[in-house]
Image (cartoon, rainbow, N blue to C red):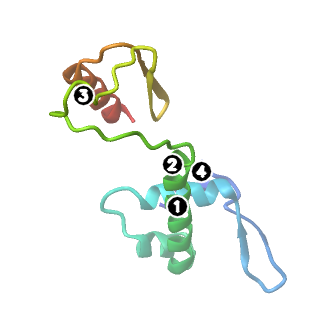
Amino acid sequence: MTERLSAAVPGFVVGRKQNGRCIYSREGKRALVEECLRPGVSVARLALTHQVNANLLRKWIKAHEASVTRTPSASAELLPVIPINAPAATRPSSPESPIEIVIGEATVRLRGAVDAQQLRTILDCLARRA
């Protein structure tokens, strides 16, 4: 396992501080965290294999998860909730107001009347690709 990481990311340890602690490359941290996020991988075993403290590795994982969680919601916009069985007069019916949905690398823009079943099919396909 050490060979895989060192081959993928040369120079995992890029230096040492005055107190003897290692300075790790950003790419090395990312590669190790991505390896930890795979199903069935033991964080403790991976940490031992790469001579990294398990608590430090868990800290990197938390930081990674926080950055992934924070990124999409930074531009999130709240939308009104309207019950399906609400009278037609209370539902917004403006064909000029488009809907834009971003999933991973894909952007879906909807204008006019939208068929719920077709939209669900499109979103399911995109979610599987992401």
Quadrant of the image occupied by residue 130 = top left
Specify whether 99 is left or right of 52: left
Closer to the camera: disc 1 or disc 4?
1
Disc 2 or 1, which lies upstream in sequence? 1
> Residue 108 location in percent, x, y?
42, 22
Q: CA distance from mark 1 to mark 4?
A: 28 Å
Q: CA distance from mark 4 to mark 3?
A: 42 Å
Q: Which residue is tagged 1? A: 66
> Residue 117 location in percent, x, y?
19, 23
Task: Judge whether 106 appears above or below 9 on screen.
Answer: above
Q: Which residue is tagged 2? A: 73
- Closer to us: 128 or 9: 128
Q: CA distance from mark 2 to mark 1?
A: 11 Å
Structural crowding at the residue carrying mark 4, measured as other residues with C-alpha within 10 Å and reported as few (<14), some (14–19) or many (≥20) = few
Amino acid carrying label 1: it is: Ala
- Please give the label number shown on residue 26: none
Task: Judge whether 34 appears above or below 22 on screen.
Answer: above
Image marks 3 and 1: residues in contact by CB distance under 8 Å: no
Res. 4 visible in picture: no
Amino acid carrying label 3: it is: Arg
Closer to the camera: disc 4 or disc 3?
3
- Please give the label number shown on residue 120: 3
- Please give the label number shown on residue 7: 4
Could you say whether the residue bearing mark 2 is in a helix, strand or loop? helix
Disc 4 or 3, which lies upstream in sequence? 4
